[in-house]
Image (spheres, helix red, strand yellow):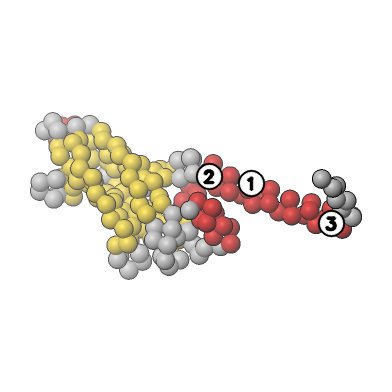
Amino acid sequence: MKKVKLNRGAKIIVAVISIFLIFILMTILREELNQKDIITFKSVKDKSGILTSVSLSPNLQKITPGREIFLKITIIRIDKEKSNGLEDILVQYSLKDKNGIIMSLGSQTAALATQASTIETIYLQKDMKPGNYLILVEVRNLYTGELLSTASESITIEKKGLFSEILARIRI
């Protein structure tokens, strides 16, 4: 093999390109590492004595279309006197736009004695418009439909940027 000698200008260009690629990789890694951090959303206690909370990564409060959101939903009965042992519940989670239109919907049933937890996924469509959205979790009695507790938080869907597009193509 023949060795190629680079002149000073070519060396500078290679160095700049290398620094740019390292910056892109560090940005992607930082985003991936941040997804493991957990924050807790606002919770609302209802008359039923049940408390519901939702957790997700802090960097997901601002997210681009085409991604998925992992929700950790925890339901705790704090008023054990109102309990008749196990209670069958329906946990509904949804993503709504600013007009209240449901963009994504899911549900899970569980038996609640003192505490129940589940991890659920909301998938964001690739063509979602940028703006504010609401994640809403409702806990209902499975048989009567009575609303027992709710938790909600707003998130912002941002326009895809150059780095988001590159990251999305790498993951395909």
- Are discs 2 and 1 less than 8 Å apart at CB? no
Q: Specify the quadrant of the image occupied by residue 30.
A: top right
Where disc 1 sits, the SS reads helix
Please provide percent x and percent y for residue 148: 20, 46
Closer to us: 65 or 51 = 65
Please provide percent x and percent y for residue 67: 44, 54
Q: Residues within 10 Å of mark 3 (few under 14, many from 20)?
A: few
33 displayed left or right of 81 = right
Q: Residues within 10 Å of mark 2 (few under 14, many from 20)?
A: few
Q: Which residue is mark 3?
A: 10
Q: Which residue is mark 2?
A: 32
Q: Which residue is mark 1?
A: 26
Asked if residue 148 can be seen in this view, the reply is no
Q: Cα distance, mark 2 to mark 1?
A: 10 Å
Q: Cα distance, mark 1 to mark 3?
A: 24 Å
> What residue is shown at x 36% (from left), y 58% (from top)?
134
